Image: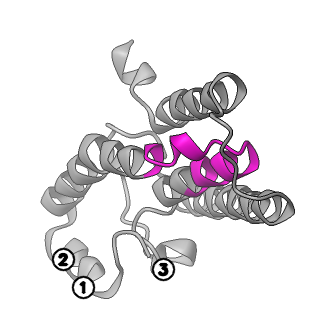
Amino acid sequence: MQKWIDIPPVWLAAFAAIAWWQSAYHPMGLGFGGAWADFAGGLLVGGGLVLVALAFAEFRRHKTTVIPHQEADRLIQTGIFRRSRNPIYLADVLILAGLILRWNAVLSLPLVPILLWVLETRFVIPEEDRLRRKFRAEFARYCQKTRRWV
């Protein structure tokens, strides 16, 4: 049961809830400055959703799991995975940053690097260790040509 709770969308939802709560109940008179923040926030959220859709399409095309903590059947190096080894985690960070901008949650900005740290330590590093053990030289070549984030 705990592994189903310890998944990135739950972490994203928790951090987003904290940001929303902060903006609704403790704005402290701070703001990003209107329409540009709404626009930039919308771009970040939209970009994150596009990354998720592109990554899910690749997982489906290659018939391997998208669920963290499970062993992958294949090493995906096509589509969006040519640009980033972790497009879904990158999307989570972009979505949180976009929501913070849209909600004027200035005091919640530190949540962005904290979410990045949580995703990297709880998911990225363990997943890469599993891929490294299973795909060895192929994964090493993939790491040389594709960055972890962008």
Q: Is residue 145 left or right of residue 33?
A: left
- Amino acid found under the numbered disc labelled 1: Gln
Closest to the observer, 100 or 70: 100
Closest to the observer, 103 or 120: 103
Residue at image location 75% in from the left, 60% down from the top: 37
* Residue at the limit of the structure toward the right, as seen here: 35
Residue 78: image x %, image y %?
51, 77
- Amino acid found under the numbered disc labelled 3: Arg
User: Can residue 105 be seen in this snapshot?
Assistant: yes
Identify residue for label 2. 140
Closest to the observer, 86 or 70: 86
- Find the distance from the CA under tag 2 to the CA under tag 1: 6 Å
Which badge, 3 or 1, comes first in the chain's sequence?
A: 3
Label 2 element class: helix
Name the mark on residue 83.
3
Name the mark on residue 136.
none
Q: Are marks 2 and 1 in contact (CB under 8 Å)?
A: yes
Q: Are marks 2 and 3 in contact (CB under 8 Å)?
A: no
User: Which residues are the magenta region?
Assistant: 94-112
Identify residue for label 1. 144
